[in-house]
Amino acid sequence: MTGSNAWSFLRKVLVVDGVISGACGLTLVLGAGPLERWLGIPAALLRPVGLTLFPFTALLLSLARRAALSRATVGGVIAANGIWVAGSVLLLVSGWIDPTALGYAFVVGQAAVVAVFAEMEYVGLKKSGAVEA
């Protein structure tokens, strides 16, 4: 993957990450009540978590549109995704919530998707070669 193709790949990954993050945030905020019953995760946790995804979505979509990408900013996105994955694992092992089997699968599944995004963003950043401002 050449530097130019890597930046194009990275931009596409940022857009897809942003769209999925926004959709997940909207689902968590608007569907917190039913999700609480199905997942066993309190709506009082689902709503604020969903709300945190809106500025993250805006950041990702904004980054993907910029003429130049900052390696440090993309590195921050990768770190944020890593923190999300770690937080998801911590949520399950801490005993703070008592999820249903579906809730457990949901937390593990979304953490896995976020980990894949972090990895793809890392690969795109690493293969991009030259630093853009």
Image (spheres, rainbow, N blue to C red):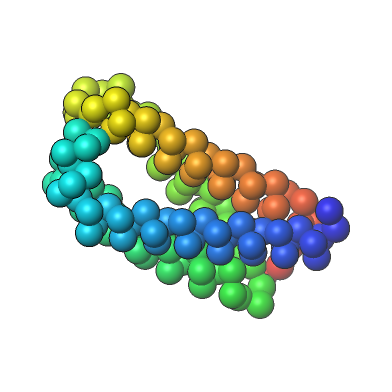
The residue lying at 51 percent from left, 72 percent from top is 62
Describe residue 132's horizontal placement relative to residue 41 as left or right.
Answer: right
Q: Position of residue 64 (x, y in %)?
A: 59, 69
Which residue extends farthest right? 2
Q: Is residue 35 above or below residue 24?
A: above
Q: Position of residue 71 (x, y in %)?
A: 64, 59
Res 45 visible: no
Describe residue 92's horizontal placement relative to residue 78 as left or right.
Answer: left
The residue lying at 51 percent from left, 69 percent from top is 61
Q: Assign the C terminus to one quadrant of the image.
A: bottom right
Q: Is residue 44 above or below residue 93?
A: below
Describe residue 119's horizontal placement relative to residue 84 as left or right.
Answer: right
Q: Position of residue 44 (x, y in %)?
A: 14, 47
Q: Is residue 99 above or below residue 66?
A: above
The residue lying at 18 percent from left, 47 percent from top is 34
Which is nearer the eye, 115 or 104? 104
Res 32 visible: yes
Which is nearer the eye, 103 or 115? 103
Q: Number of callouts in the render? A: 0
Q: Position of residue 50 (x, y in %)?
A: 29, 54
Which is nearer the eye, 108 or 8? 108
The residue lying at 70 percent from left, 52 percent from top is 124
- The quarter of the picture where residue 39 lies is top left
